[in-house]
């Protein structure tokens, strides 16, 4: 990634006769570079920079939706939108739900994907089949998978019919204690294949000689797993944690569709779902903008903290 | 992990005679447990797909145990869901949105990736840093201001441009292109430049033909984003004739199911149609899906 230097200083040296031509080429390349990258830069400005600045602006004003072309004043209100966000009990619940999501998703993802990747990382038959099977939910649309899960875990669904009298009451998706864990479980299931592949790739980087050395030192299989494999794939584990935080902060289709709008009684609501409900359904975009800013801050802070934690000792 | 119960050294000496390759047959129980584990995983991943297909083909789709058995198969659920949300129209909308994103990513993403890898211009470091940063910013956080801008200010609601805009250039694809162009030998480009070829020609005739695998991987990765996306098209399309399949199926899921005889079967039929293109592409191009992107993610 950093190995850019040879050409950064300009054309290859040692040929003074060509120097004039070379700098002309250099200038042309610099112009071409700026030109080639400009659509992408424009895209980043329009889709990221401007909305980010705009959301900050909206969050400190009283803002109303208007039809295109009409103009309504948006008076400055300071931090009052933020005060509304911090005093709203449902917002607290939504952030707590990110916590519930992380507590279930992170350990489960790390454990299951590492175990499955370790099992796949040997000479086994049907390897391609297993890889494909694990990856399938990851590439399939949430909406399609939610439809199946809703049916599987419905009150009269397949799972409850299997469990018979052991089925939870109220059922999985309408139970205030189980709705959020079910969302976490759904997302873990959907994304696990991606992380299995991630760990599988990371395992290739763990040197075979480390296992041999550990084996010579008398370490058994389990000991090798914890002393060689687990530290060896730490960068992948850091990625799992960061992805989990981003996914947790981003949940929308799952609470909206799987648990019918964050139900029951907001038990499985999420910040992005609230942004939609408050901002667009109920017409308070200023509240939603402030909530968005708080969410970005929250994601940044806990991502940094998580990175510090998982990379400790590296 | 399963080997934990087995005293490893004794077992190894006992089976030393038929030990041929490492990790192979020398631990029969370990190997069996490994297969059992992998098979259990495969069942957990595949059963919902199996259930989705069987449920979509049954005349009556209920949750009882017999519902997992394919019997009394019929195609009526597909006609029913087609009557409720017009599958064809929705598929066309999904297709236009996805192809728009693919084209923009291919054209502008390749240009940007090539510039970031092989050309030198002021601000290159800043652009690359933004590319990495953007991948960490969850898109959903920007949906509200984007919604205000795109739908309210620019009047692009119920419009393909409005649907495509936030995904137009996939940053992961730009990153992939850059990594790929970076690996190509400098001398190749220098030679072409000394021959007087312009940068666009070098990109088109030298770099791009060699980058085919990266292009394929990037296109496959880019495809699943807009095809599966729900939140953004859900916000920008109110007109049912403009909704992509993920959105119209979701509205069927939340409030249109009462309109058909076998609502669950119809819903699962719609889910099969939505899932099929991505699954088919994945099965066809599996190799390209798995290796490159993830390696670059880990070693990044």
Image (cartoon, rainbow, N blue to C red):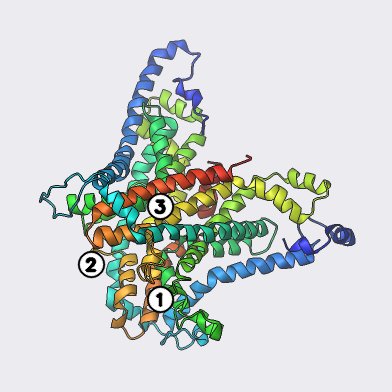
Report which residue position mark 3 lands on: B222
Alpha-carbon span between mark 1 and mark 2: 21 Å
Label 2 CA crowd tier, 10 Å (few <14, some 14–19, many 20+): some
From the viewer's perspective, tell me whether residue A253 is left or right of residue A137.
Answer: left
User: Residue A277 location in percent, x, y?
Assistant: 29, 62
Please report whichever mark, 2 or 3, sits nearer to the chain's N-terminal start: 3
Residue at 28% from the left image edge and 73% from the top image edge? B85
Against A310, residue A275 (above or below) is below
Report which residue position mark 2 lands on: B241
Residue positioned most to the bottom: B72
Alpha-carbon span between mark 2 and mark 3: 24 Å
Camera-nearest residue between B205 and A105: A105
Report which residue position mark 1 lands on: B268
Residue positioned most to the left: A70
Q: Are marks 1 and 3 on the same chain?
A: yes
Per the image, label 2 sits on a secondary structure element best described as helix
* Picture quadrant of residue A256: bottom left
Residue at 79% from the left image edge and 54% from the top image edge? A220
Foreground mark, 1 or 3, reads: 1
Label 3 CA crowd tier, 10 Å (few <14, some 14–19, many 20+): many
Please report whichever mark, 1 or 3, sits nearer to the chain's N-terminal start: 3
Against A28, residue A200 (above or below) is below
Please report whichever mark, 1 or 2, sits nearer to the chain's N-terminal start: 2
User: Residue B159 location in percent, x, y?
Assistant: 22, 57
User: Residue A206 location in percent, x, y?
Assistant: 67, 45
Camera-nearest residue between A142 and A255: A255
Camera-nearest residue between B260 and B136: B136
């Amino acid at each position: 990634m950093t190995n850019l230097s040879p050409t950064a200083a300009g054309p290859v040296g040692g040929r003074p006769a060509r120097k004039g031509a070379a700098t002309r080429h250099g200038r042309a390349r610099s112009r071409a570079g700026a030109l080639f990258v400009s659509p992408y830069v424009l895209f980043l400005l329009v889709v990221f920079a401007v909305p980010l600045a705009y959301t900050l602006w909206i969050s400190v004003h009283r803002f109303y939706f208007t039809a295109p072309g009409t103009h309504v004043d948006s008076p400055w209100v300071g931090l009052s939108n933020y005060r509304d966000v911090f005093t709203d009990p449902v917002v607290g619940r939504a952030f707590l739900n990110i916590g519930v999501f992380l507590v279930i998703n992170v350990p489960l993802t790390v454990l299951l994907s590492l175990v499955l990747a370790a099992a796949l990382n040997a000479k086994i038959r049907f390897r391609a089949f297993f890889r494909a099977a694990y990856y399938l939910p990851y590439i399939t649309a949430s909406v399609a998978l939610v439809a199946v899960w809703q049916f599987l875990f419905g009150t009269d669904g397949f799972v409850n019919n299997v469990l018979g009298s052991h089925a939870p009451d109220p059922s999985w998706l309408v139970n205030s204690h189980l709705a959020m864990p079910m969302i976490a479980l759904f997302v873990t299931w959907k994304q696990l294949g991606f992380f299995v592949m991630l760990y599988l790739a990371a395992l290739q980087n763990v040197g075979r000689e480390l296992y041999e050395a550990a084996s010579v030192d008398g370490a058994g299989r389990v000991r090798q797993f914890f002393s060689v494999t687990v530290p060896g794939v730490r960068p992948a584990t850091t990625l799992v944690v960061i992805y989990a935080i981003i996914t947790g902060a981003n949940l929308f289709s799952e609470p909206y569709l799987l648990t019918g709008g964050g139900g029951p009684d907001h038990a499985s609501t999420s910040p992005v779902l609230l942004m939609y409900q408050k901002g667009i359904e109920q017409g308070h975009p200023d509240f939603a903008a402030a909530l968005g800013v708080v969410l970005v801050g929250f994601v940044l802070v806990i991502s940094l903290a998580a990175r510090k934690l998982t990379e400790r000792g590296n | 992990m399963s080997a934990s119960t087995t005293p490893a050294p004794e077992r190894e000496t006992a089976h030393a005679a038929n030990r041929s390759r490492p990790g192979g047959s020398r631990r029969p129980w370990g190997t069996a447990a490994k297969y059992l584990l992998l098979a259990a995983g495969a069942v957990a991943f595949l059963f919902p797909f199996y259930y989705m297909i069987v449920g979509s083909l049954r005349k009556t789709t209920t949750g009882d145990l017999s519902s997992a058995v394919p019997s009394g198969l019929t195609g009526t659920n597909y006609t029913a869901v087609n009557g409720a949300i017009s599958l064809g129209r929705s598929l066309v909308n999904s297709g236009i949105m996805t192809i728009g994103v693919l084209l923009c990513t291919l054209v502008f993403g390749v240009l940007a990736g090539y510039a970031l890898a092989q050309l030198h211009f002021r601000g290159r470091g800043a652009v690359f840093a933004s590319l990495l940063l953007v991948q960490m910013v969850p898109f959903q956080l920007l949906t509200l201001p984007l919604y205000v801008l795109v739908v309210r200010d620019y009047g692009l609601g119920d419009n393909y441009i409005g649907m495509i805009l936030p995904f137009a250039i996939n940053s992961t694809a730009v990153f992939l292109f850059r990594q790929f162009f970076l690996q190509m030998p400098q001398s190749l480009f220098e030679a072409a430049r000394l021959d007087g070829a312009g940068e666009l020609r070098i990109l088109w005739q030298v770099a791009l033909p060699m980058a085919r695998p990266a292009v394929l991987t990037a296109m496959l990765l880019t495809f699943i984003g807009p095809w599966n996306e729900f939140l953004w098209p859900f916000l920008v399309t109110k007109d049912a004739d403009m909704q992509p399949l993920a959105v119209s199926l979701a509205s069927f899921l939340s409030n249109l199911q009462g309109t058909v005889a076998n609502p669950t079967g119809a819903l699962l039929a719609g889910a099969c149609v939505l899932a099929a293109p991505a699954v088919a592409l994945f099965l066809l191009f599996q190799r390209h899906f798995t290796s490159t992107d993830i390696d670059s993610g880990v070693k990044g």
